[in-house]
Amino acid sequence: VQLKQMGVSLNYSQLPALFIPNTYSMFYDTDAKGFLTRMLSEYQKFWTPLRKKKLLNVGLTQPHEVSTLASIVYAEQSRKKDEWPIIAGLYLNRLNQKMPLQSDPTFKFCWGDKLKGVQRLLNEHRDVDCPYNTYKIVGLPPGPICTPLPATIDIILNAPNTNFLYFVAKSDFSGMHHFSPTYEEH
């Protein structure tokens, strides 16, 4: 199936942004083109004019950028969704200030399954050359690192204004984080 013929201008890395998680009724004989046509239709329904306006308001230009950032927010905090807005605002602050995102899930993504089961990521793991390593690149990686939930996408579009630039996991194993506006406080 030629995606360009269907009007899809996403590259291979951005393609996961096309898929909006939901429950869909599909027939058993749906072919690849039928499936992609349906997913494109759902994508276009999801990205309403209001959502497109909001993405510009947060400093992003394309829906796939929102999906990419939402995937990072979700990968950083999949257990405590109360922190999603804070993490979203923090990463938007970093993007707006041209700071590296420095997201552990993005450099972990570079390793594929090689770090599966590793509980503590180390500096040596960060030293990988990969376009998804946000310790080495400034800006968003080429595409999502997972398929983000619609709620996470909406969190990005409605992120609160914060002054946070740094966060670290709390040492109490609660799954929560400490947030700070300066490196000194961090």
Image: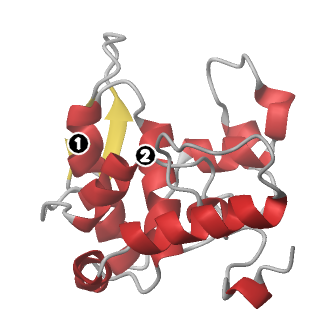
Position in image of residue 37 (x %, y %): 66, 69
Q: Quadrant of the image for the C terminus?
A: top left
Snapshot quadrant of residue 140: bottom right
Query: Which residue position holds label 1?
Result: 179
170 vs 17: above or below = above
Q: For this view, does 168 lie left or right of residue 30?
A: left
* SS at circle 2: loop
Amino acid type at circle 2 is Leu
Residue at x 52% of width, y 55% of height: 102
Amino acid type at circle 1 is Phe
* SS at circle 1: strand
Number of callouts: 2
Position in image of residue 33 (x %, y %): 79, 67
In depth, the one of 15 and 167 nearer the eye is 15
Q: Earlier in the sequence, mark 2 or mark 1?
A: 2
Residue 77 visible somewhere in the drawing: yes
In depth, the one of 182 and 80 nearer the eye is 80
Position in image of residue 179 (x %, y %): 23, 42
In depth, the one of 38 and 16 nearer the eye is 38
